[in-house]
Image (spheres, helix red, strand yellow):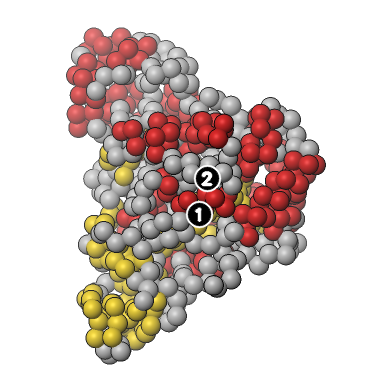
Amino acid sequence: MAYDLIIKGGTVFDGTGTDGFIADVAIKDGIIKAIGDVEGEAARTIDAGGAIVTPGFIDLHTHYDGQVSWDADLRPSVNHGVTTAVMGSCGVGFAPVHEKDHTRLVRLMEGVEDIPGTALAEGLTWNWESFGDYMDAIDFPHAIDFAAQVVHDPLRVYVMGDRAVSGEPATADDIAKMRELTRAALEAGAVGFSTGRSDVHRTADGEWTPASEATKDELVGIAEAFQGLEHGVLQAVNDFDLERGDPTAFDREFGLLEAFAGAAGGRPFSLSLMQRDFAPKQWKDIMARAEAAEAKGIPMRLQVAPRGIGVVLGLQCTFHPFIGFPSYKKISHLPLDERVSIMRDPAFKAQLLSETSEKVAGDGTAIPPLADTLLQQIVFISCKMFKLGENPDYEQGVEHSVYKMAEAAGVPPLEKIYDILLEKDGREFLYFPIYNYTDLNYEAVHTMMSHPQAIMGLSDGGAHVGTVCDASFPTYLIAHWTRDRAKGAKIALQRAVQMLTADLADYIGFKDRGRLQVGLKANINVIDHKGLRLHAPHMVQDLPAGGQRLLQEATGYIATIVNGQIVIENDKLTDARPGRLVRLGQKAA
C-alpha cells in the first residue's frame, strides 16, 4: 500500500497509559492506517529513531475566541504539541452578539483575559451574530484543530442587554431564551458551555462580569439545554467569594455549582482547581466536595495545571510594580530604550522609590488589583519572585528569590526589583507564581495532578498575553515532570502523555483523536524527549494594531502532525494549514 507519510522506528506512547513500544505509524488521507512493522511506500518518511511518538496534545482551556477569527497559526499552542484547542473558557467570548455590543465584549475580554483591546478592535472580523454564525465564520483552515464552547457573558448580554450588567437577576423569559440559544449552539456543534464566577475577573472598566452574579435558577435553566444530548460539557471558574470575607460563601457557591452540573442530564462538568495564597487549604475542600458530588452521580472533573500559575513582570509587560508611580507615569509613553535610560539615572530612581503608587496608570487605565497587592505585600511576595533564566526554572526555592537577592545586596526588595527590571536593556523579566506555590514547592501541584478526578487544563492559551505564556504547559509537563524534576516525585512518561491526550479526549467527547489507533485522525507528535526544552519567554509585537504578546519557544518537536500534514517541523511552523473547527453531535453527511 502507498501511504502519504510513515513515521519510522519511534517509541510509541499511544495515549492509553501503557508502556511505550517501538513501531512505525503509517498515515493516509489524514487517518492512521497502520501501526507496527509497516511495509509499503510513502510520499514522505520521518525517521523517529530515538524519539517518542505520541497522539497530538489537546488543550482544554484556551481563549483564542478572537484570535481564531484573524489568525490561522494559533501560536503559541501549536509550538507546544497541541493539535486541538478548546476555546470559550471562563464564560468570556464574542458570540452571540448584537452589533451595538461589540465594544462591550471587547472591553470584557480585555479586562478578564488581558488581550489588548486595540488588537481585538482591529482584528475581530465580526461577521456573525448567532453562535452558529460564529462557528461558520471561524471554520476556515488553521494550523491546528479547534473547538468552541458557548460562553455565558456574551449570551447574557445578547438576551438581557444593559440589564445583564445592572445586577438585576434574569427573568424566567430571559432564562428560557438563554437555554434555547445554548441548545441551538450545541446542536450546531458547540462542545460545551462555560461560565465565570470570579471576583478577580473584571472588565477593562473595572466592572463585574455579566455572568458573575447569575442566580442558581439561571445556571440550572441554561444547563437544562444539555438534557437529551449525547455530547457537551460544562465548565466553570469560581473563587468562592473568599476575597469578600464571607465564611458561608464556599458552601453556597459549591452548592450552586452542583445544581448547575446536576441539571445537565449527566453531562460532564469541570471546575478550575488551584492553590490560592489567601485560602491555602481551599483546594483540598474543593477536592473533597468534588469527590462527594461524584459519589452522588454528578460527573465532576477538576482542571489542574502542571506548575505555578503566575505572571511575568517587566517593563515590556502589561504591568509591573511601578506603573502607578508618578515619576514612572510621566515616562510610560516613551519607547523602552528611552525609559531605561531615564530610569538608570540615580536621581530619578531615588525620586520614584520615594513615591507612593497611584490607582491609575500612565495611559489612564485602572491599575489591576494585583499591582496593589504586589506593593502592599512586597516583602512576602518577593520571597516567591524569581528570575526564570534562559532555561526557565519554575520550581525554585526561596534561596533564589528576589528577597534573598535584595538581602544579599543590602537593599529593600522593591529597589532590587527596580534594578533587575533594568537588566538586559530593560528586557529582563521576573516570574511571580500567584497560585500553586504557597509553600514554595510543587507538593500541592503533584497532589492535584494525581487526583482521580483531575484533568489537565488552565493554560489560558491566547489570553493574558502581556503577562503569561502558559500555553507551554504541555512541553513543561513532558520535559519537567517526566525527566528533569529533582525535588520530588516524577510522573511516568506514559501517564503524562495520557494526561494530555486520551484523558481529555474522553472528557470532552472526542472519539476520533487522543490515541494512536488505526482508524483515528493522524494528529501526532514526534518528539526528541531527551532534547525537549523550553526557552525563556520573550515579547513580540505581532498582534493587530501593533499589539504585543509573550511567546515561548520550545526545542525538541521533530514534527507535529495535524490531519496527516506536518505543521511543525524541527520546531518551526510550516505553511500547512490542515486544522479546522471540530463540531460534536453532527451526523455524517
List the residue tagged with mark 2. 128
Write down the quadrant of residue 323 in the picture.
Answer: top left
The spot of residue 270 in percent (x, y) is 60, 55
Percent x, y of residue 33 = 38, 83
Other-residue count near label 1 (Cα within 10 Å), few / some / many at <14 / 14–19 / ≥20: some
Amino acid beneath label 1: Asp
Note whether 297 is above or below 548 in the view shown.
Answer: below
Vertical comparison of 37 with 364: above or below: below
Residue 564 location, x and y as percent?
A: 34, 71
What residue is shown at x 46% (from left), y 52% (from top)?
138
SS class, disc 1: helix
The one of 67 and 199 positioned closer to us in this rendering: 67
Residue situated in front as seen by the camera: 523 or 376? 523
Quadrant including the N terminus: bottom left
Q: Nearer the viewer, residue 122 or 442?
A: 122
Which residue is painted at 66% across and 51% down in the image?
182
Judged left or right of residue 86, residue 207 is right
CB contact under 8 Å: marks 2 and 1: yes
Residue bearing the label numbered 1: 136
Residue at screen point 30% across, 82% down? 3
Task: Compare marks 2 and 1 and give the one earlier in the sequence.
Answer: 2
Q: Is residue 472 visible?
A: no
Front one among 487 and 511: 511
User: Secondary structure under badge 2?
Assistant: loop
Q: Residue at x 30, y 30 (%)?
A: 316
Residue 345 position in % (x across, y down): 20, 14
